[in-house]
Amino acid sequence: MKLPPGFPGRGEATNASYAPEEAVRNAVSGSKAGKLVFSLGSTMESVGEVEAAAEKLATEAGLDEDACFHVTVAAREAALNAVLHGNEYDPAKQITASFENTGKSLIVTIADEGPGLDPEKIPDPRTPENLLNSTGRGIFLIRSLMDEVHFRQLHPGTELTLIKHLAAEDRKPES
């Protein structure tokens, strides 16, 4: 997926020695620059920017189509939860997203400025009383699609770290 000119657009890359496009390219290809961090507004457009960066990270790491999809969906769900449930679309609040390829794992971290979240209190969407709920499946999906998921309370806010290990079986076959 081609990123829009000036990506991440509304946010700023915190790696000051690189322009946003170069920072994205280096962060996802595993170079020593290695990490891209940017802040975005609490909008659906921001969710799309996080999704695009995650897709680029996974694709450039050489993941196969399924593993790429897993990373992209998990990052989108985490960003959506940060915007919708964490920041409640508050224009005064931001989400922070970081993307890193360590060579052994892809690490996506999404943080919001909301009231915080206790992951132990999230209802299981598979139980009979929750099956027909229209929401409540995002964290379940994230946990199902990623190898590791970690929550950290920021006071205010919640930080969600998603990790996908770069196992040989998740890589595209060499041509």
Image: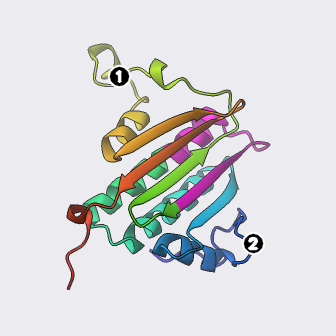
At 47% across and 75% down in the image, what residue appears?
A: 29
Q: Kindly identify which residue carries mark 1.
A: 124
90 in magenta: yes
**Precedes in sequence: disc 2 or disc 1:** 2
| Snapshot colouring | rainbow
Q: Left of 151 or right of it: where is 149?
A: left
CB contact under 8 Å: marks 2 and 1: no
The type of residue carrying mark 2 is: Ala
Give the quadrant of residue 155.
Answer: top right
Query: Where does the N terminus fall, quadrant-wise?
Result: bottom left
Q: Amino acid at mark 1?
A: Asp
| Vertical arrangement, residue 25 with respect to residue 75, above or below | below
Image quadrant of residue 50? bottom right
Q: Residue at x 34, y 62 (%)?
A: 68
Q: What residue occupies the far top of the structure in this picture? A: 129
Disc marking residue 93:
none
Q: Which residues are magenta?
A: 78-99
Residue highlighted by disc 2: 16
